[in-house]
Image (cartoon, rainbow, N blue to C red):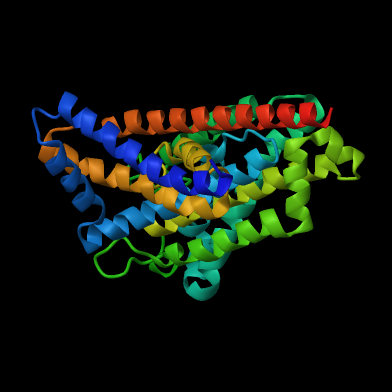
Amino acid sequence: MHPTLRGALWPLLLIGTTVSILALAILAFGQRQNPGEALLTLWRGAFGSLDAATDTASRAAILIFYALGVVLSFRAGIFNIGTEGQSRMGAIVAAAIAVNGPGRTLASVPFLGIPLVLLFGAIVGSCWSLIAGVLRRWRGVPEVIGTLMLNFIALALARYLLSDPALLRESRGVISQSDVIPAGLQLQSWGATEFHTGILLVLPLLAWANVYLFHTPSGFSLRATGLNPAAAKTCGINVAAVELKTFAMAGALAGFAGAMGVLVRYRLDKAPYPSDDYGFMAIAVALVADLKPLWTLPAALLFAALEVGTGSMERNAGVSHEVVYLVEGLIILAVLIRHVASSRSRASEGSAAAKAGV
């Protein structure tokens, strides 16, 4: 099959597989519910109303920020699984600025205060990611271990800061939440929906990531480093600089998303916005998108729709919300099988070409 046609059929196959798995799960766990009706309930829960659609869009937006960092990292050969911690550090600094003295000053000039809070979140997320990069480069610590351990540290730090009345909340506040940030720093939703101005940043971000990765010398250096660091170094690419830059960019995207979550929810919560496992779900989004920035949009919408829609399906069809994790796991398995099959196909084609040349 021609590669272009195969690439076009893959999204349709993925959607069809997802729907089939959901239908089987409904038959197995749905208390004799009709799969068609249950799937229609899921669709309505994710897209059937303005509230549902904006909730799905809001969750997809945050997933895209996370996933683009994963795409850049994996393209550079860096297995960064620390977006959850990087996001949490961005959220911590955003809350710390907003609920203390600087927040009152910045709230008086929202057009300047909001971008500054988001910028500080991105900077802190970037620095947090760079810790793993430095450990990897100069101490040989695998980034999988480094980023994972930093996740735990960031989450523990957030819990500690939320437990101390002198830091992010007053003594009468709720232990699992910071104080509410000033109104001038809040990213207000539009009407009674979940849609907020931060979502408008997604399309420009996707365009930037695609242009950067595939149409700039820096993006070429990043991809070359990921494909073969030794060959890239031989060609004059500063592999160490590329890797550290990628760590910084991925952390900045996650930190920005964490700060944006605080401004959207008006406080720092014990559980990150909007879910406590979106950093790991973003890995699935990036893999489903085949590490292509533009494809993260439909992939993120798919996973966000599953998150939102299965909540409605649980209430109306008796299918547990946990079934979404089964579906996500099987989707990831399908993606990995596809990658293995593609690798073997390319290897066989190369072997055949070599034999023909001989």
Task: Give how far across and how far down residue 189 sits, in percent.
Answer: 33, 66
- Quadrant for the C terminus, please: top right
* In this rendering, position of residue 51 left or right of residue 81: left
Task: Give how far across and how far down residue 297 sits, in percent.
Answer: 46, 54
* Residue 297 seen in this snapshot: yes
**In the image, farthest residue toward the left:** 32
**For the point 31% across and 69% down, which residue is it?**
190
Instruction: Report how many numbered discs are placed on residues in the image.
Output: 0
| Residue 209 falls in image quadrant | bottom right
For residue 280, above or below residue 8: above
Say which of 273 and 281 sits in front: 281
Say which of 18 and 218 sits in front: 18
Say which of 290 and 10 sits in front: 10
**For the point 41% across and 33% down, which residue is it?**
331
* In this rendering, position of residue 252 left or right of residue 174: right
* In this rendering, position of residue 100 left or right of residue 312: right
**For the point 74% across and 59% down, which residue is it?**
216
For residue 54, above or below residue 38: below
Say which of 148 and 270 sits in front: 148
Task: Give how far across and how far down residue 328 sits, in percent.
Answer: 38, 33
Task: Give how far across and how far down residue 130 sits, in percent.
Answer: 70, 41
For residue 217, above or below residue 323: below
* In this rendering, position of residue 9 left or right of residue 233: left
* Residue 109 seen in this snapshot: no
